[in-house]
Every structure is written in structure tokens, then in C-alpha cells.
Image: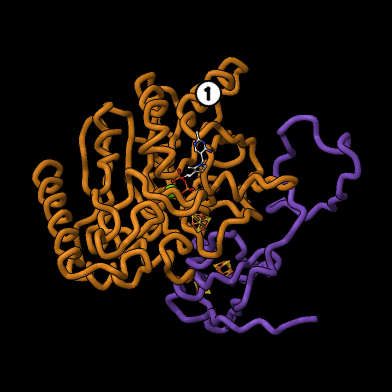
Chain colours: A purple, B orange
Amino acid sequence: MLKPEIKNYVTPKHIRDYPTGPSFEAGHLVSINAGWRTFKPVVDINVCTGCYQCYLLCPDGAISKTDNKKIEFDYSFCKGCGVCAHECSFNAISMVKEELTK
Amino acid sequence: MVDIKKITAKNMTDKEFFFGHKACAGCGGSLAVRLAMKVFGEKTFAALPAGCMSAVGFIFPQMAFLNNAIISTFPGTGSMLSGMRAGLDALGFHDTHVVGFAGDGGTADIGLQALSGAIDRGDRIIYICYDNEAYMNTGVQKSGLTPYGTKTTTSPAGKNLSGAVTHKKNLFEIIAAHDIAYAATASVGYPQDYLNKLSKAARVNGTSYIHIYATCPTGWGTPTETSVSLAKEAVDCGLWYLAEYENSTFKINRKLTKPELLKEHLLKQGRFKHLTDEDIKVIESERDRKWERMLEKWG
Ligand SMILES: Cc1ncc(C[n+]2csc(CCOP(=O)(O)OP(=O)(O)O)c2C)c(N)n1
Ligand code: SF4
Ligand code: SF4
Ligand code: SF4
Ligand SMILES: [Mg+2]
């Protein structure tokens, strides 16, 4: 497993449903961060050289390397900061306005 | 010396150990934590005091660390790291890393005594200070590492004052003065240099300390996409520096390359927008004084 997967969260109904101590399981995620974005990064695979600077510099670890030595975004966790597009020396990433969804 | 393979963007692990956190978009501190965890790996035990990285990593019922990680008291990172090391050693888990991630306030101000104690004992721990130059988690208050002229909520800029009236505390040299096994400064704008220093710290048999300059778009009033380039520029124009302290010797890793960028660099940040030419002169002369001293003593 390279990254944790989203787990289902059941809202506690009673005080006894809460954990007894302040500790919690490592890598326990119950929500994504996609809703933070107003722009999303889109990569032009033909321009991407596979230098992996964007992968290195994404504060959210939302970029992964693909088998063909290019990159792909994890849009569930990308916050749309634009660091990847700004740092790509080949201008392979553009930031595209998100459409409003109902 | 053993030849150790450099960790780079191409060969580093694909695993993420700090993932799904709720840091602001473009947060330099979260990049510093993410990269450190990728270098240290699975067998790492982390402690984080109150501050942004603990606040964004441990939001019930979420836990963004894939490792064992715990929130320490605000002043107690150093001592908690010592205790963790002792506990792991007692259990025979020697092949592990113990790392702390604390902010500038948590390190230079309230946590300085506990950190000093840990360095004095020479405990095998790694302490990383991510320096966003203010108490961000509580709403941008001035810390000992807030530079001159910074507008914060406790050092407002107006008719009477133009932001913080003191210069940055000389923390790197205070840490080095303990004759610590390894200390370094870094910047999220120079990621390969940071990765190299993390690898070094991981191999030190004693206490190591890395002070990384970490952009905060929310507290600095800067565009989220410039978090890496701004941190690079800060080094290039000499407001921050890349250095190491090892075998009781200081070393500068990078020369001052673009001193003329200073004014432009400052004025593109919301926290410095109010600065007058006179204020900038004060900042410039402090920078020059510092560099002159560094080059003379460590050059
Ligand atoms: C003893 C104590 N005093 C004050 C606080 C409130 N507090 C929590 S986080 C924080 C600011 C932390 O600033 P810094 O260490 O620079 O980390 P940042 O939030 O900038 O990442 C403060 C003042 C606290 N938790 N404990
Ligand atoms: S920085 Fe640009 S060229 Fe390099 S891997 Fe990312 S998208 Fe491709
Ligand atoms: S926009 Fe920001 S969060 Fe999204 S992939 Fe690029 S660097 Fe990562
Ligand atoms: S306030 Fe600054 S340091 Fe804190 S999470 Fe946001 S960007 Fe990061
Ligand atoms: Mg801070």
C-alpha cells in the first residue's frame, strides 16, 4: 500500500462509541480534500519529460509516477495549490478552472 | 567514508507517510514533513508539539501519519523525543528513527530549553524546525524567528511601527554552540539540498537538528503556487542561508547569488507590503552584516 485509503466513518451515536484514549490508528483517513480546489492541474503527457520535480514538490503527495515514466494526479487529494505547474521547467502542467458541479 | 546513494526525486520511495493532511494549499511546512518522512521511512517515530503540523495531521477521526506519531506539549518536543528514544532502545528497537517536527515558535521560543537538554544529553534523535516565521496555528503572532519588518497580529504595521522591530533570533548558531553532532539549515526552495541533509541526519549517532525555511502562504500573504520559488529566492537574496555544522565546524553550502533581488522579493509578500525604502535599508544592512560575519568566520 503506497497511500492510505479512505475508510468509512460512522458518526458516534453515544459517548461509548468514542475511543477511550486520545490515540488513533495510523493512516486513518475518512475524508478527501478535492473540494478545496478552484483550479486543477492537468498534465500534457506529450510535453512531460518525467523529471519528477512536480512529484517531489507537491506538499500533498498528490502526484504519482506512472509506469510509462510520466505522472498522474490524485484528484481526491490535490488541493490545487499550483506549485507543480509553477515548478515544472517544461510547462507541461496547466491549471484549469474547476467547473461548478451540482 | 562509506559511499551512500543519494536520495532523489527519481529513486525515493513511492510510499507517502504524511498524506491526507489538512494543511492549507501550498503549505511549505507540510512539504518539509512529507519529504523528511519519505527519507526516514517506515521505522520512524514522530513527535509534534502544538502547531500547524500537528493541527493539520491529527484531526479526529483522521490521522495523516502512517507511522507512530504523537502530539507533545508545546514546550516539550525535545524531552519527549528523548523519552521515545529511551523507550525504543529499552525494547531493543535500535534500528529506528525518532524525529520531531516543531514550528519556529515551538523551537526558538517555548521549546528551546527541552531541545537544549536533549542536545546536551546527545540523544540519538532528529529535530526538525519548520520555520514559517510566526506562530501560524494560532493566527500569525510574532515569534523569535519572525524577521524585522514582518506584519503579524502582534507586530502590526501602521503609523507608529512598520511591523516586527527585532531581527531573527540566531537559532542555528545557538544550536551549534552546544557542539551538536550535526546541524543544518535548509529551505523548501532547495529540495535536493534538504534531502541530502535529511539522509545525513538519519545516519548521525547523536543529536541532529535541521532548520528548514518553510513558506506559509496563509500567514505571509503569498500566492500558493509560489511557495517553492519564494523559499528559493529567500536564499538567493540572502535573507536565509544554507549551512551545516559538523565535526565542530561551520560550512556555508551556497553563496549569496542574487543580493539585488531583496526589495522585489520582500514586496511581493503581503506581510512586507507596507515596508518603506528606509525599512528595506534596515533589512539590507542586517543581511549584509550577517553575511559578512558568516563569510569571515565560516567561509
Ligand atoms: C503551553 C502552550 N501555550 C500556547 C499554546 C497555543 N499554541 C498552539 S500552537 C501555537 C503556535 C505555534 O507556532 P509555531 O511553533 O511557530 O508553529 P506553527 O503553528 O507556525 O506551525 C500556540 C501559541 C499551546 N498549545 N500550549
Ligand atoms: S515537472 Fe513537468 S516534466 Fe517533470 S514530471 Fe512533472 S509534469 Fe513532467
Ligand atoms: S496543484 Fe498542488 S496539491 Fe495539486 S498536485 Fe499540484 S502541487 Fe499537488
Ligand atoms: S497556516 Fe501556514 S503553516 Fe499553517 S497549515 Fe496553513 S500554510 Fe501551513
Ligand atoms: Mg511558525
Q: Is residue B31 above or below residue B281?
A: above
Identify the residue at image location x=90%, y=40%.
A14
* Chain hosting mark 1: B
Q: For the residue carrying disc 1, how many other residues have a C-alpha within 10 Å: few (<14), some (14-19), or many (20+)?
A: many
Residue lying furthest right: A13
Element on which disc 1 rests: helix
Marker count (numbered): 1
Residue lying furthest front: B159
- Please name the amino acid that badge 1 sits on: Arg
Q: Quadrant of residue A81?
A: bottom right
Q: Is residue B39 above or below residue A45?
A: above
Q: Position of residue B294 (x, y in %)?
A: 15, 46
Q: Position of residue B38 (x, y in %)?
A: 55, 48
Quadrant in which the N terminus of chain B appears: top left
Q: Nearer the viewer, residue B190 or A29?
A: A29
Q: Position of residue B11 (x, y in %)?
A: 52, 55
Identify the residue at image location x=30%, y=64%.
B158
Q: Is residue B268 above or below residue A58?
A: below
Q: Nearer the viewer, residue B231 or B10?
A: B231
Reading the image, the residue beneath label 1 is B85
Q: Nearer the viewer, residue A18 or B125?
A: A18
Q: Relative to A22, is B157 on the left or the right?
A: left
Q: Relative to A57, is B257 on the left or the right?
A: left
Identify the residue at image location x=84%, y=51%.
A9
